Image (cartoon, rainbow, N blue to C red):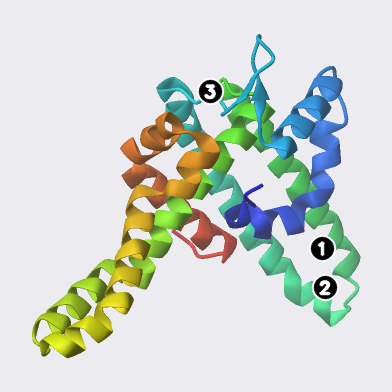
Amino acid sequence: MRKLWWWLPVVLVLSACRKDTVGSGPEAGTEGRETVARLEGEVTGDDGAAGPYPLTQAKLEAYVGYQRKMLTVYGSLMRGLQDMGPLMDAGTPQALEAARSGLKLIERKAQAETDARKAAGLSTDDVNRIAEIVTAVISQRQMGRTLQYEEELKKLEALQSRMPVEQQQELAPQVESMRRQVQAFQQLPEARREFGDANVDLVLAREADLTKNYQDMLKAFAGVRR
């Protein structure tokens, strides 16, 4: 199961609100089963056969809009929690009130998340499953750009071409290894095995917007004002 590590900072801070959104209301039973299905990493169709989550272009478009709304929510929340930090650390009489304000922020976040999801026409399971696919694809593509393997490969190949034949052969395994790394970041074989070619291709078609959302979410976690 691939971890949604770009959501981890918020999950750690806000884990308390999950029991409010999942464990109450008329959908509590179905959401519990959806969570189990998500953790198993598979969806069972009418014929009982397991397969990838059936991502569609419409669902992905809705998810992109959902992400943008949640960026504002998370940004405000993280900044609010950071602003309360000095009060909590100082042990002042205002510390209790700061804690109460923090709980109110978390409650507002939970409600805003529910409102944004419903406005997008997505279920809790949709959001979780789409996030898993998007994270797997976009984080790998982002890592490839950050490590600049393509640029390094070009430099290594240029260096190899200027070497004597014997030294070229000695460097060949290193060049081939880096070439495989570049290919992996470009073609995403692991994500394709786990989520299916169709799902990965749909995400790649919106890579620019999803990458921006990914980067902005990291800034939101850091409390950076946009």
Out of 89 and 159, give the one closest to the viewer.
159
- First reached walking from the N terminus: tag 1 or tag 2: 2
Q: Which mark, residue 39?
A: none
- First reached walking from the N terminus: tag 3 or tag 1: 3
Residue 140's place in the image compared with 82, above or below, is above
Q: Is residue 139 visible?
A: yes
Question: Please, what is the three-letter code of the amino acid marked with disc 2?
Answer: Met
Q: Residue at x 42, y 34 (%)?
A: 197
Q: Residue at x 62, y 62 (%)?
A: 79
**Are the two marked residues, 1 and 2, in contact with CB atoms closer than 8 angstroms?**
yes
- Quadrant in the rendering for residue 154: bottom left
Residue 185's place in the image compared with 36, above or below, is below
Measured from the top left, where is residue 155 in percent x and y?
19, 79
| SS type, badge 2 | helix
| SS type, badge 3 | loop
- Badge 2 crowding class, 10 Å Cα cut-off, few under 14, some 14 to 19, many 20 or more, is some
Q: Nearer the viewer, mark 3 or mark 1?
A: 3
Out of 97 and 174, give the one closest to the viewer.
174
Question: Please, what is the three-letter code of the amino acid marked with disc 3?
Answer: Pro
Apparent side of residue 32 relative to residue 37 in the rendered image (left or right): right
Apparent side of residue 10 relative to residue 192 in the rendered image (left or right): right
Residue at the spot of label 3: 54
- First reached walking from the N terminus: tag 2 or tag 3: 3
- Badge 3 crowding class, 10 Å Cα cut-off, few under 14, some 14 to 19, many 20 or more, is some
Residue at the spot of label 1: 98
Residue 7's place in the image compared with 69, above or below, is below
Question: Please, what is the three-letter code of the amino acid marked with disc 1?
Answer: Ala
Residue at the spot of label 2: 88
Marks 3/1: CA–CA distance: 44 Å
